[in-house]
Amino acid sequence: MNRRLFLFYLLGFFSLISILILKSIAPSLVDQQLIFFFLGFVLLFVLSKLDFGVVNHYSGLLYLAVIGLLVLTLLIGVVTKGSTRWIDIGSLFHIQPSQLAIPITSLFLAKIITRKDMNKVKNILQILGLLLVPAVLILIEPDLGTTVVYLLSVGTVLFFSNLSLLNLSKIVVLFLMIGVASWLFVLKPYQKQRIFTFLNTQQDLSDTGYNARQSMVAVGSGKFFGRGVGQGVQSHLQFLPERQTDFIFASLAEELGFLGSSILILAYVIFIAYLLFTAYRCQNQVLQLYCLSLVVMIAFQIFVNIGMNMSLVPITGVTLPLISYGGSSILSIFLSLSVVLMIRDRDLKITTRSFT
């Protein structure tokens, strides 16, 4: 099988699962989700035909555009549940610029890092400044979950650069200090409460622990084969909060059971392996760093979302990639993958023979 087609088939599988679950738990959202996936496939097909050299050349302008969108979000964005994360585009669509920050910043920083001596103090400070500007803007929204995903994903580019172990250790200590300062002076009370709730989910089942408790009930009630599509109790009776986004895995587990959940996780493993193999075969360090940051972005989101659905990690509002409802997340992943296909076609020297 051609590797390009393999990726399209894999994305097609995720889209079908997403539509299947949404059709069951939130039918009114299916049409919009279909539009998001259609636009995503069009973007993937068209943009993957571009020359990577051109995209890489203008990565700096794309980075500035993302910064502009993040600032614009804070100025005119829609306030939803106390956060300002989206910009309305018409009456039906809205964009979440923070989703675009990860792939675009990763690409831009990878370009700079491969051209500079990263053991010079001024170069380290430049990269840290470029990395932290989007992070601060996302945290101000506030969006702690996306900020953490951003820092880990884009930080991967720095981690795998030619930094010495000593300088890398200094940066790690710096980020730990920033983390402590954020806990003391930046995080909102409700964000801290989520951590406390994770440590003791039984402390207040009617308030902060409610979401985690209902999610666990949904996952457990699915047993091995699930209740069946359209037969979920927690999601259909709306005991399960945010069942179409943050807790869609719990909805899936309730209706498709352990078996369906395992198949989805296996598909994710194959997806991540595909990206890792692409990174391994890269002949260009910029491309390799970009692929690794994309792997961390997707893998971490999967881990956090499934983990919080099973009360293994605190609830952070991170969606399940390619499954949860939402155009910004879907389109940003398809946009990121278009660069992966550019890499395959131009720089990998991979044959078009099938996986065997």
Image (cartoon, helix red, strand yellow):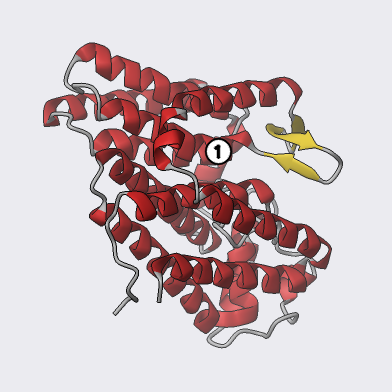
Q: Quadrant of the N terminus?
A: bottom left
Residue at point 33% right, 30% down? 111
Q: Residue furthest right?
A: 91
The amino acid beneath tag 1 is: Leu
Image quarter hosting the C terminus: bottom left
Which of the 4 image quadrants contains residue 312?
Answer: bottom left
- In the picture, measured across the screen, residue 135 lies left or right of residue 167, that is right
Residue shown at the point (77%, 32%) measured from the top left: 78
Tell me: residue 332, above or below residue 21. Answer: above
**Residue at the far bottom in the pictured view:** 225
Residue 101 position, x and y percent, is 52, 34
Within the image, what quadrant is residue 56 found in?
top left
Question: Could you classify mark 1 by the number of other residues whose Cα lies within 10 Å: few (under 14), some (14-19), or many (20 or more)?
Answer: many
| Percent of width and height locating residue 98 | 57, 35
Position of 170 relative to 293 (above/below): above
Q: Residue at x 69, y 74 (%)?
A: 20
Taking the image as shown, residue 129 lies to the left or right of residue 337, namely left
Using the image as rendered, state which of residue 168 and residue 212 is in the foreground. Answer: 168
Which quadrant of the view contains residue 341?
Answer: bottom left
Q: Residue at x 84, y 38 (%)?
A: 90
- List the residue tagged with mark 1: 100
